[in-house]
Amino acid sequence: MDYSDHEDLIQSYEDDDDNESDANESHFLYVANAILSGTARLNVLLPTATILAFTIFAPLLTNDGVCTTLNRWLMGSFISLCAASCVFFTFTDSFKTASGRLYYGVATLRGIWTFNAARKKPCVPSDYRLRWADFFHALLSLIAFLAFAGSHSDIVGCYYPALPRKVTNTLPLVVGFVISVLFVVFPSKRRGIGYPFLLQKDALYSRC
């Protein structure tokens, strides 16, 4: 084997190594982008707006934890309403038509039912049908809210004042962490209401 053949063989090995390195880097970037994209969607999947509303009204409805029978009924009704909103907003979605107009709706067994124009349909209606994953995400959202609400100091003082403080301090953190990890590992394709940035096309969530 002469010198030129030897150089060609070395160059071939180097090219193979570069291609393998590029493939590994591309795979790493895809996984990293998927994880970051799922993390960005936590604001949509977790009941942040519901928890904010609960935090505002809980001291008022419970009289700062010193409850009467009326306060307990009012607070129980409000918790039920917030829990229902967690489930409802998990099923909401949005899409853009060919003209670029944005529509919001709720996922159903037949597709998406839009709020402002029921006749408008996305380009692939079957992608918006209600699926088992939606119920899984709704359950996680509900658990996250109930864990936070049940550990709120006013709720504890109103319903079960003997509960140890260690439980109320630890439970929402543990539950929130576990549910956040599950949301990242098993992301939802629902875009929700009020998150137009999620309508941008990407490799993981593009549907239109």
Image (cartoon, rainbow, N blue to C red):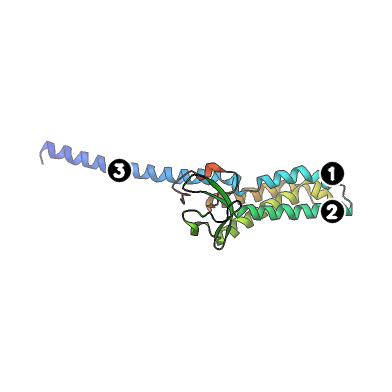
| Residue kind at label 3, given as amino acid type | Asn
**Quadrant for the N terminus in the image:** top left
Distance CA(mark 1)–CA(mark 3): 64 Å
Q: Residue 155: in sight, yes or no?
A: yes
Instruction: Answer whether labels 1 and 3 touch (C-beta < 8 Å).
Output: no
Q: Position of residue 22 (x, y in %)?
A: 34, 42
Query: Which residue position holds label 3?
Result: 19
Residue at the image point whose x is 47% and y is 56% from the top:
124
Query: Which residue position holds label 2?
Result: 72
Query: Dot 1 lies on which element?
Result: loop
Residue at the image point whose x is 49% and y is 59% from the top:
126
Residue at the image point whose x is 43% and y is 45% from the top:
30
Q: Nearer the viewer, mark 1 or mark 3?
A: 1
Query: Dot 3 lies on which element?
Result: helix
Nearest to the observer: residue 25 or residue 126: 126
Distance CA(mark 2)–CA(mark 3): 66 Å
Q: Earlier in the sequence, mark 2 or mark 3?
A: 3
When the figure is inspected, residue 2 is found, relative to residue 107, above or below; the finding is above
Q: Position of residue 178 (x, y in %)?
A: 61, 51
Query: Which residue position holds label 1?
Result: 64
When the figure is inspected, residue 123 is found, relative to residue 39, above or below; the finding is below
Mark on residue 97? none
Q: Position of residue 79 (x, y in %)?
A: 75, 53
| Residue kind at label 1, given as amino acid type | Asp
Residue 108 falls in which quadrant of the image?
Answer: bottom right
Nearest to the observer: residue 119 or residue 64: 119
Nearest to the observer: residue 57 or residue 108: 108
Q: Position of residue 153 (x, y in %)?
A: 79, 46
Query: Dot 2 lies on which element?
Result: helix
